[in-house]
Image (tube, grey):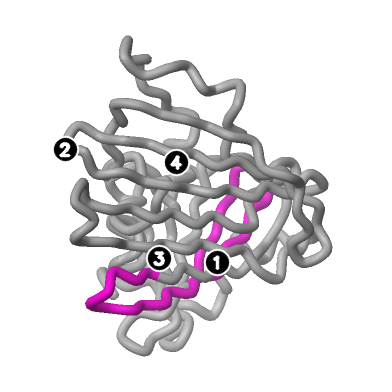
Amino acid sequence: MLAMHACSCASRPPRENVPDISSRVPAFAEPDNYSATIIQTIDDGDRHEVIETRVARSGEMFREEWREGGELRAAISRPDLGKIFLLSIDRQLFVETSNDLKAAAEAMPTGLGENAPWNPASYDEPETVEVTPLPESAIDGHICTAVERKAVFADRHSELTRIYSAKDLGGLFLRMKSESSSFDRASHKTVLVERKNVKTNVSDTEFTVPSNYKRAASL
């Protein structure tokens, strides 16, 4: 998530054989101030995994919390300071590093980035794309616009993604379900990403290292 946040303004040059769908697919957007729990469910037939994180944003400041090895950790991105802080909340320790994409990627929760359907590093350009608007839908009390995106790739595997974005939260997506299948449908993978407990009042204390935390060389 931190890597996604750091490269959210990056774009790729258009390909001639891929139609321009930018006007029909909602951009990944979010309010300037919000927090939410993100629940990612991955199912490929052989495994069923649920990954839960919490994120918070205030302007350009970003925070993410997750459990790793039974330990509660957090990463705080502070572009205004040029720093990323990696925290062990249970041990009250922190590591400080420069705010660059490599550092952000290293701070990501184990196993999350490569499975996220929006992850630019693992995303191949499709050969064909078809985008269809879906009826508006209510999710957790928020009216959401919705689209369905069908994509076929060079190896003939296909992906079907449905995205539901809250109109009152600046286009923040609350639900994204991506299903991918091999060309012969021998394999199938589903990734469901949901945002829960969305709040739009975030304290600046979320983005500072508590004074009683001790600096460490590593966690």
- Residue designated by label 3: 86
Residue 16: x and y, percent? 32, 10
Q: Which residues are magenta?
A: 42-65
Judge left or right: residue 28 versus residue 142.
left
110 lies left or right of 156 = right
Check the picture and name the quadrant holding the C terminus.
Answer: bottom left
Residue type for callout 3: Leu
* Badge 1 or badge 4: first in the primary sequence: 4
Do residues under tags 2 and 4 come within 8 Å of each other at their CB atoms?
no
| Disc 3 packing (10 Å; few <14; some 14–19; many ≥20) | many
Residue flagged by tag 4: what amino acid is it? Ala
The local secondary structure at tag 1 comes to: strand
Q: Which residue is mark 2?
A: 155
**Badge 3 element:** strand
Spatial CA span between label 2 and label 4: 30 Å
Q: In the displayed structure, would residue 211 be above or below residue 114?
A: below
Mark sitting earlier along the chain (3/2): 3
Point out the tag, 2 or 4, that comes first from the N-terminus.
4
Q: Is residue 54 magenta?
A: yes
Mark 1 to mark 3 CA distance (whole Å): 19 Å
Q: Dots 2 and 1: beta carbons under 8 Å? A: no
Q: Which residue is mark 4?
A: 6
Q: Disc 1 marks which residue?
A: 38
- Residue 93 place in picture, x, y as percent: 41, 78
x then y, percent, for residue 80: 55, 40
